[in-house]
Amino acid sequence: MNEDITFDVVVVGGGPAGATAAADLASKGHSVLLLDKAGRIKPCGGAIPPRLIRDFRIPDELLCAKINSARMIPPSARFVDMPIDNGFVGMVDREGFDEWLRARAADLGAERRTGSFERLTRDADGVSRLHYTVKAKAGEALAEESSVRARMVIGADGAVSGVAKAAIPGAERIPFVFAYHEILKAPAAGVGGYDPKRCDVHYDGRFSPDFYSWVFPHGDTLSIGTGSANKGFALRGAIAELRAHLGLEGVATIRKEGAPIPLKPLKRWDNGRDVIVVGDAAGCVAPSSGEGIYYAMASARCAADAVHEALRTGDARALAGARKAFMKAHGRVFWILGIMQWFWYRNDRLRERFVAICKDKDVQRLTWESYMNKELVRSDPMAHVRIFFKDLGHLIGVART
């Protein structure tokens, strides 16, 4: 490959964030290289809200299921069902979903290459050179290294981002939840309590001491997983226990995946010159829920706009606009969800009270409206007042669970 070619933008990582950034910038007429590892599938429940489907023009055929309710299950098993009125949660399989996004970026003009990021250097003229390796073929001892020049680099290479560590101060200090899930062949409805139209969320210290566990339908398959920031917690063992608890231990396992997931946005996304990070690499995963697909794609759109402006004007200060725009739209939600996770997930007694709060119809309605539209609901102030006093009752222990 011609290593003297200079791309306007090289995007490292082809998940939802990277593919979105590549598509947006290619559609604006920039020369874009999308560099992605081969065969990587991120462990993910696969839930996407209607706003994502609208904003990013996701075709209906990519949805492997449409969920119309969630079941919140505390340690006592006194579950709470939360039906979705006038909406749904879309479910996608990341293998097919991510590839479709990458293919769309290519259709819009982005060049695709397979490779793993190694390091960044600078040529004599100050332009960044991105070095990457291509996996060795059978019988070859070493991977082949190549490089490419880039006026701008977007790191969308996941939670443990090599691009972030190479260029963004403080990137190594981002906190993580470690997630693990297994993809199973979907059983018949009713087996182990399984419902192909419902997401089950387990708030139970046996399966996660500080986060939650899940059973999410994916059409012909399901995702059963858990997460924890406790490095000593046995995630695989917890899922084995959860499968046995649900009567799913005999269901066929298709694949197993694990990865760290960040739960706090980086304080800075760019290096002030020509590198910016998005998605998991920037910490764009919602606390409490662990939701990442929508926020990855939203952060990528913010970054694409900022990179376009920096390329257009030659002013690298435009890159800082990406984080500002994202946090203006979603920072308050992240702050609230962070407090929720810190308080309610600390022990099983609090988890019981948290699930009990979810019985409230105001809580359910505002939760789903906020989730589906990705903004806090302000149109019903009295509902928020009612919720405040009910929450206060649970906090001081006068409300019944």
Image (tube, rainbow, N blue to C red):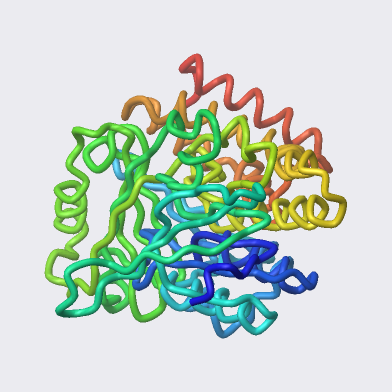
Residue placed most toward the observer, 324 or 213: 324
Within the image, what quadrant is residue 6 found in? bottom right
Residue 27, percent across and down?
76, 74
Residue at 51% in and 28% down = 170
Residue at 70% in and 74% down = 57
**Where is the C terminus found, in terms of image quarters?**
top left
User: Does residue 11 appear in this view?
Assistant: yes
Within the image, what quadrant is residue 301 found in? bottom right
Within the image, what quadrant is residue 250 found in? bottom left
Residue 323, percent across and down?
70, 40
Residue at 72% in and 57% down = 304
Left or right of 149 in this view: 74: left
The single residue placed furthest to the front in the displayed view is 124
Residue placed most toward the observer, 381 or 121: 121
As drawn, 346 above or below 251 = above
The single residue placed furthest to the top in the displayed view is 396
Image label count: 0
Residue 36, percent across and down?
45, 67
As drawn, 242 above or below 198 = above
As drawn, 140 above or below 150 = below
Left or right of 278 in this view: 151: right
